[in-house]
Amino acid sequence: MASPSGSGAAPAKSSASSATDPILRNALRYTISAREYAVLHKYVISKSRALKKRAPTVDSMTKIIEGPDIKKGSQSGGKGKGGKKRVSTARTADGGKLAQQGGGADDYNTRAIRHSIRVFVATGALMKLWEIVSAKVLQKKQDASAAKQKKQPLHKSPTLRLSLSLSTILLLYRLLFRFFTRLRVHLLDQSAAPFRVRNPRTAGTLTSPYAPAVGASLAGLALGIYPSQHMRVSVALFALFRALEFGWNCAEENGMIWGWEKGVNGRPDKMRTRPSWWGSWMLQPFAFGQLLHAVVFDRDCFPKPFGNIIFNNSGAYLQPKPEDYPTGVQWPGTWDVVESLAQMARSNWPAFISPILYPNKEDTLPAALTSIAPLTSGAHPLINSLSCATLHPNDPSCTRTYLTFWLKSFPPVTRLFLLVYSAMLLPKFKSLYHFPVSTLHSLIANALRMSAFVTGSVSTAWASICFFQTWFPRAFLPTQRFFLGGFLAGFWAYLEKKRGRGVFLYTTKTSIDSLWKVGVKRRWWRAMKGGDVWVFVAALMLTGVVYEKDRAAIKEKAWRKGISWARGEGFRDWAVEEEDLLAEGEQEHGGEAYADYHGKRD
């Protein structure tokens, strides 16, 4: 029998617990889930005696988070193929994807808020870490604009606004996806038949299987929280190019690009295969042509880091300052040479008058090209074109200069790519251990191909100036020949057509960004306020539609899992899991399970 004192303390403890449990439970639910705490307790807390004594047990934490009256769902203890334990899965009642039964009180909205808070904190921490690394490790100098940025109030801080933007996008995407999914299910119900009859177009739009993905993409408008800077444009372009890549894969794998071959003798139709020469490398001629034209005539619309990589490896065409050159006289720099080439093109490529052959002639250079006088004053007398006297004044042979560029640039570029590919090989150390010869052969071959692509592209871009000056009339395509030279340089991408997809898409994205800025500068089109935000919305829309139609069109497993996580369906690869589930259903129940599943899904 319990003592009177004990019976009196129990109600007091119960009342205090009931007063604090709702606050504590909500705080914990938006911080960590019961399953995550179980993993944390198993691998961290249980290893320390001090933490184990003070920290609550898994059962008590589950009761605090989910409430004491929550009944846990049961999981099937059957085994699938290979003797592996299989968790029972079922379609959620609100039309969502397959999910594990027994979710408890850790519902969809709670997970959405918890994950958005984590994105907010993680983004802010990474931005602060990047600021520290940029200031200390990279020794990044702070100019006046950076000092002014530090003095900004908290609500205008780029770090805060980026964190708020990304977390809001995730939260709104999940909530909107949930809303449109439930709305679609309700409209497909028999009780909503009168509404579908009265409003066929509206009902057809809202009941489309792509309606949740399209509606949820409006969450991308939250990108506008972040101030309009280059980073926001880069995010929008990156999302757009990935979405276009997914869309192309989906169209190609469903026979929308190359068509179908009609079967003969009762055989089914066969989808035509892609030609062996077709690939993303074909974007490089257009991208390089635009970039070369932009760097000459629209320097402010050209990405400077991209140009620094090219110009720092062009010693054969950009002459360094001689050691014995007078300190008081200015030597033409890289951008002086580039600007002089632009002025030559605008002047229809004037002829070169050698000061050595005509020492008494005063106007050997046009007035707009006096900045390159230190280069052309000592140029070889056999040189005929002014561009050649600027790019290689000491050598009258354009071909020899081209070969010299290869000899000087190819070895250091190859060493650089050997280091890069070696670093990329570290996560695949097992392949090096088991297959050392083939792995090293692949490493060296990749480095050589990429080095040949980079060196050949840069050398062709420079050599094309001399080539066109020799074979083209002076007034024939005076400015457009830069685009033509970059176009020819882009064909070197064929060497890396199988493995250079990432590089090709990056250069194309850079070219599109540059082309847009050039068009705005020259008033070919108008810059739309917040246009990058709408581009991001369109990218989310296309990605969601492709994922809904054919998940296998998204080749990267990590991307499929990331999209599933963003939709609130868990960090899982449904393209693989659904195929396994259907295969098991076909083996156990025949074609009826397959048809029943797809009937529910559609």
Image: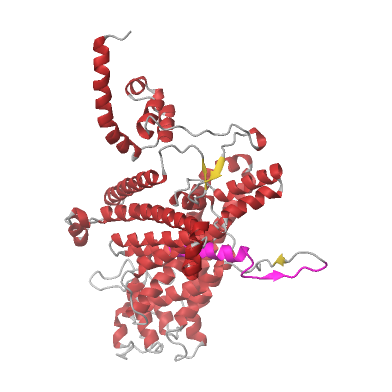
Give the quadrant of the N terminus: top left
Range drawn in magenta: 239-265
**Residue drawn at point x = 46 percent, y = 68 percent:** 202
Check the image and tell me how it is coloured: secondary structure
Q: Quadrant of residue 172?
A: bottom left
Residue 431 spot, x, y in % from top left? 60, 43
Q: Is residue 408 visible?
A: no
Q: How many marks?
A: 0
In the rendered image, residue 448, in percent from the top left (x then y), is placed at 56, 58
Looking at the rendering, in which quadrant would you find the C terminus? bottom right
Does 247 lie within the magenta span? yes
The spot of residue 513 in percent (x, y) is 39, 70
Q: Nearer the viewer, residue 586 or 522?
A: 586
- Quadrant of the image occupied by residue 435: top right
Q: Is 434 in front, or is 27? A: 27
Q: Residue at x 31, y 10 (%)?
A: 2
Residue 331 drawn above or below residue 143: below
Instruction: Give the percent coordinates (x, y) of residue 178.
Output: 43, 53
Tell whether 35 sits left or right of 262: left
Say if 246 sits above or below 525 in the image.
above
| Residue 144 shows in this picture | yes
Q: Is residue 235 left or right of residue 548?
A: left
Quarter holding residue 258: bottom right
Locate residue 461 relative to residue 346 in the image: left or right. Answer: right
Q: Nearer the viewer, residue 84 or 465?
A: 84
Between 471 and 592, the residue placed more toward the observer is: 592
Is 466 inside the magenta-drawn segment?
A: no
